[in-house]
Image: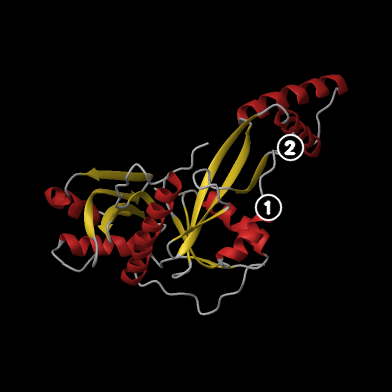
Amino acid sequence: MNLPKFRNAIVYRATLPSIEAIEGHLAELQYEEIGETEFARAAFVPNPITGELVTPIENGYAIVVRRDEKIIPAQVVAKEARERIERIEKLSGGKLKRQERNAIICDVKVDLCKKAFVRSSLILALYNSKDNLLVVNTTNKNISSLVGSLLIKVVGSLKTETIHIDNIKNGLTTRLQNHLNGSNDAFDGFTVGDYIQLSRLVEHKEVLRFSAEHASITNELTESLAGGFTVDQMELNGCGVNFLLTERFHFRRIDTQSFNYSDDEDKAFQWRHQTGADLFQFSQVVNQLCKLLAYKEPEQQKPAA
């Protein structure tokens, strides 16, 4: 199973234990085969490239989560449950109560679970101990929450905070308007790329996607923004990183500077070096954007139980 490259990110402010301590914690929840009647299972696994449960990198470390999930299509469940309910109602001569129907649906799911296909995936998480940033290589909120919950489970108490920018959608929209009107510091430290996605909600959601050098479509962008469209996501470049920033402060299509390695350098060394550089560059992006978009940490933070 291949470990996905660092291309997406949901970011948290977090205070995790040292690399020595976290390795002991992660060893408490290592991988075991998913059970016959389990719908999903997740655990920490050694990095398939370095062979380490916790891989040290510059100013932090990397960990890997394996997630196994049974694939049970909803339409298959519905069809089997409907057939069972119809058979029972035909034999009994009456309609089943909702509670009874729900129990049958649960039984169907368990039966299908025993013979369902298992989909497995690896999730990369990077931790910058200097800036207290936990970066999960995904744009799926459920996946990032899964990694956080596993860390909480093994560490016991973990202080984490989702990086939330107040009104980021309108903040990006206003900055793009200012940028189009000639402001040089609207995206101070970043340059605007070629991809911009806008949307507005009238009777239904309308989406506009622009994939061209923005200077050539200034009029179209300006008219759209004046017509009530706001920024969903846009391409930015800064700190040596090219990426798409969404209105949820999620990151897509992250492209960092790559290094050239000689043939005599092993794959584990290359991965540690490149990933450490990726985390360093990306952390600069996050810190710069927090400053640009006026991110403020909550006055009171409570450790997660």
What amino acid type should be assigned to the residue bearing mark 1?
Answer: Leu
What amino acid type should be assigned to the residue bearing mark 2?
Answer: Gly
Give 287 or 258, whichever is nearer the viewer.
Answer: 258
Give 26 or 151, whichever is nearer the viewer.
Answer: 26
The x, y position of residue 168, in whole percent, is 37, 63
Position of 160 relative to 73 (above/below): below
Total marks drawn? 2
Residue 292 falls in image quadrant: bottom left
The x, y position of residue 191, in whole percent, is 21, 59
Q: Residues within 10 Å of mark 2 (few under 14, many from 20)?
A: few
142 displayed left or right of 185 = right
Q: Which residue is mark 2?
A: 35
**Which mark is in front, 2 or 1?**
1
133 displayed left or right of 37 = left
Residue most toward the right?
Answer: 92
Q: Which residue is mark 1?
A: 29
Element assignment for label 2: loop
